[in-house]
Amino acid sequence: ALKLLKILKDNNIKATFFLSGIWLINYPHLVRAIAAEGHEIGNHSYTHPHMPLIPLSQVSNQIIRTDALIKNISETSPYLFRPPYGEYNQAILNTLASLGYVSIMWTIDSLDWKNPGVDQITSRIVNNIEPGAIVLMHQSSPQTAEALPEIISQLKEQGYSFGTVTQVLDAK
């Protein structure tokens, strides 16, 4: 994640990081670095469960516990939630709304978590890009940091700019 942060900083790009409670607990120094560099932090649940398979009381608990960690460690107040595995239903959306959250999905899945190779990650993003796209990448995938400089360079050549999820949504 430090390598990713350096690449983003070198290119003057702000991103949105959706963090799980477990990750927040394990890497508080990285969370503080993400916040200090002006990136947006979103909630990605506490233990990354399949949300539709757990009771709504546990859904709330997953979000509230992670929310508290984000506020305590990063001193930012999240309002964006990315459901683990992209799985949700209307009851989960209602629960999120009651907690002041908005659910955010993606328009391009880089599939970086499969470690398909730097070229595959790059071409999946560059070949599917469109204005307002939200690209799903994972800070823990080793090939992501390797692919990122080339992705940024190719997208800049095509005239694209970059922003946090909030900036992208506000621009629509």
Image (cartoon, rainbow, N blue to C red):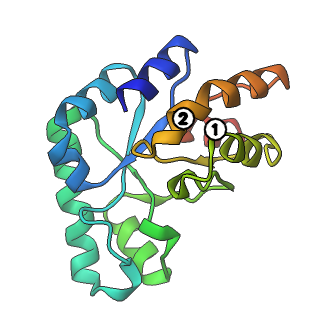
Three-letter amino acid code of the residue under disc 2: Thr
Residue at image point 21% right, 61% down: 64
Q: Decide: is 95 above or below 63.
A: below
Q: Residues within 10 Å of mark 1 (few under 14, many from 20)?
A: some
Answer whether residue 132 is visible to the viewer in this image. Answer: no
Three-letter amino acid code of the residue under disc 1: Val
**Circle 2 is placed at which residue position?**
164
Image marks 1 and 2: residues in contact by CB distance under 8 Å:
yes
Q: Element under label 2?
A: loop
Residue at image point 45% right, 59% down: 82
Counting from the top left corner in percent of width and height, residue 58 is at 22, 78
Q: On the rendered image, what quadrant is the C terminus found in? A: top right
Q: Element under label 1?
A: helix
Residue at image point 24% right, 28% down: 32
Counting from the top left corner in percent of width and height, residue 57 is at 22, 81
Q: On the rendered image, what quadrant is the N terminus found in? A: top left
Answer whether residue 35 is visible to the viewer in this image. Answer: yes
Drawn side of residue 172 relative to residue 67, left or right: right
Residue at image point 25% right, 66% down: 47
**Circle 1 is placed at which residue position?**
168
Drawn side of residue 39 relative to residue 109, left or right: left
Q: Residues within 10 Å of mark 2 (few under 14, many from 20)?
A: some
> Image quadrant of residue 147?
top right
> Image quadrant of residue 109?
bottom right
Counting from the top left corner in percent of width and height, residue 51 is at 37, 78
Counting from the top left corner in percent of width and height, residue 116 is at 61, 53
Q: Decide: is 54 above or below 88.
A: below
Drawn side of residue 141 relative to residue 159, left or right: left
Any mark on residue 133, and which? Answer: none
